[in-house]
Amino acid sequence: MTMHLALTLHLLGVIVWVGGMFFAYMALRPAAVEILQAPFRLRLWEAVFKRFFPWVWLAIVFILGSGYYIIFGLIGGFANTAVYVHIMHGLGIVMVLIYLHVFFAPFNRLKKSNATESWEQAGAALAQIRWLIALNLTIGLIIVVVTTAGRYFLK
């Protein structure tokens, strides 16, 4: 794999994940709140996440796989990387851990609560997912800024 291909896969993973969170949080969420009653909105979010989360898994594979390939296969390890790469890596791992929590905990509660029409519990699960996605989106945007501007300021 070349550096160009690795960077392309890395960037595509970031675009899918961070862009998907931005769209969901800034466009889909307000529209769903405006138009749909709670049971329909909760079922919509379950359906959205069922379609989006497989893409997040793929994005994580692309991001981590290409990132580690670049660091260890092309650059020679973390000792040879700039500070902004360490920041990107650390914050990226935090994002992955938050996503794993969302996927295995509140998303499962949302699915189970929707299946039993326990709307209050489903709403609580969705509220937790919403908060964690806002956190992950913020971290993702910080990573984008650190990565693009960091090469000029954080050597």
Image (cartoon, helix red, strand yellow):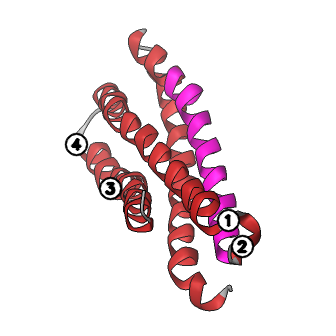
Residue on which the image places disc 2: 80
Looking at the image, which residue sits at the far bottom? 152
Q: CA distance from mark 4 to mark 1?
A: 52 Å
Name the mark on residue 23.
3
Q: Give the structural element (helix, strand or loop) at label 4.
A: helix
Q: Position of residue 47 (x, y in %)?
A: 30, 28
Q: Is residue 105 magenta?
A: yes
Q: Amino acid at mark 4?
A: Ile
Instruction: Please tell me which residue lies in front, 85 or 72.
Output: 72
Q: Is residue 120 magenta?
A: no
User: Crowding at label 4, few (<14), some or many (≥20) Cα neighbours within 10 Å?
Assistant: few
User: Crowding at label 2, few (<14), some or many (≥20) Cα neighbours within 10 Å?
Assistant: few
Name the mark on residue 76.
1
Q: CA distance from mark 1 to mark 2?
A: 6 Å
User: Crowding at label 1, few (<14), some or many (≥20) Cα neighbours within 10 Å?
Assistant: few
Q: Amino acid at mark 3?
A: Phe
Q: Which residues are magenta?
A: 84-108
User: Crowding at label 3, few (<14), some or many (≥20) Cα neighbours within 10 Å?
Assistant: few
Q: CA distance from mark 3 to mark 1?
A: 36 Å
Query: Disc 3 or 4, which lies upstream in sequence?
Result: 3
x 60%, y 82%: residue: 150
